[in-house]
């Protein structure tokens, strides 16, 4: 994460001073492990409102979809990962409306 933020700063300085981060998306989340919960809590404590409410849960259907050459919504619309990405889409749209009201 530290390296990613450093890279973003370099891009802002050299290429696009208007660059902003819409949000930070936790992925490969496993609710069964305390480690994942602790890491997520740490990310939320540090980055606060920059962290999306949506979390992409680790599940086998997300791993299988690329092998089948399909996005998760077409591979298995009822999969947990499909629902996660649908929630993310709604959250991104809502944040974009806040940042760029029409």
Image (cartoon, grey):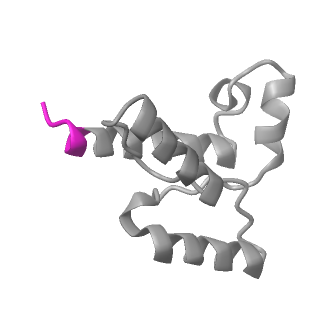
Q: Is residue 93 left or right of residue 25?
A: left
Is 76 or 68 nearer to us in this picture? 68
Residue 81 on image: x %, y % = 67, 45
Q: Residue pushed farthest front?
A: 14
Horizontally, is 12 left or right of 67 in the view?
A: left
User: Toward the viewer: 12 or 1?
Assistant: 12
| The image quarter in which residue 30 lies | bottom right
User: Which residues fall within the magenta stretch?
Assistant: 97-102
Q: Taking 71 as reference, is 95 above or below it?
A: below
What residue is at 73 percent from the left and 55 percent from the top?
Answer: 28
Residue drawn 30% across the image and 36% down it: 18
Quadrant where the N terminus sits is bottom right
Q: Is residue 4 above or below residue 37?
A: above
On-image quarter of the C terminus: top left
The residue sitting at 58% across, 57% down in the picture is 55
Is 44 placed left or right of 100 in the picture? right
Q: Residue furthest left?
A: 102
Place of residue 41 in the rendered image (x, y in percent of width and height, measured from the top left)? 57, 77
Camera sees residue 1? no
Query: Within the image, what quadrant is residue 71 found in?
Result: top right
Residue 42 is situated, as x and y percent measured from the top left of the image, at: 58, 77
Magenta stretch encompasses residue 15:
no
Q: In the image, is residue 102 above or below residue 92?
A: above
- Image label count: 0
Point out residue 87 in the picture as x, y percentages from the top left corner. 48, 46
Residue 33 placement, left or right of 82: right
- Asked whether residue 77 appears in the rendered view, the answer is yes
């Amino acid at each position: 994460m530290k390296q990613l933020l450093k890279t973003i700063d370099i891009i802002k300085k050299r290429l696009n001073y208007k660059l902003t981060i819409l949000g930070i998306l936790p992925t490969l989340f496993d609710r069964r492990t305390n480690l994942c919960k602790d890491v997520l809590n740490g990310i939320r404590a540090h980055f606060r409102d920059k962290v999306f409410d949506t979390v992409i849960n680790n599940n086998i259907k997300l791993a299988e979809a690329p092998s089948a050459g399909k996005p998760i919504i077409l591979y298995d619309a009822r999969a947990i990962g499909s629902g996660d990405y649908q929630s993310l889409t709604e959250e991104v749209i809502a944040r974009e409306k806040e940042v760029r009201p029409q």
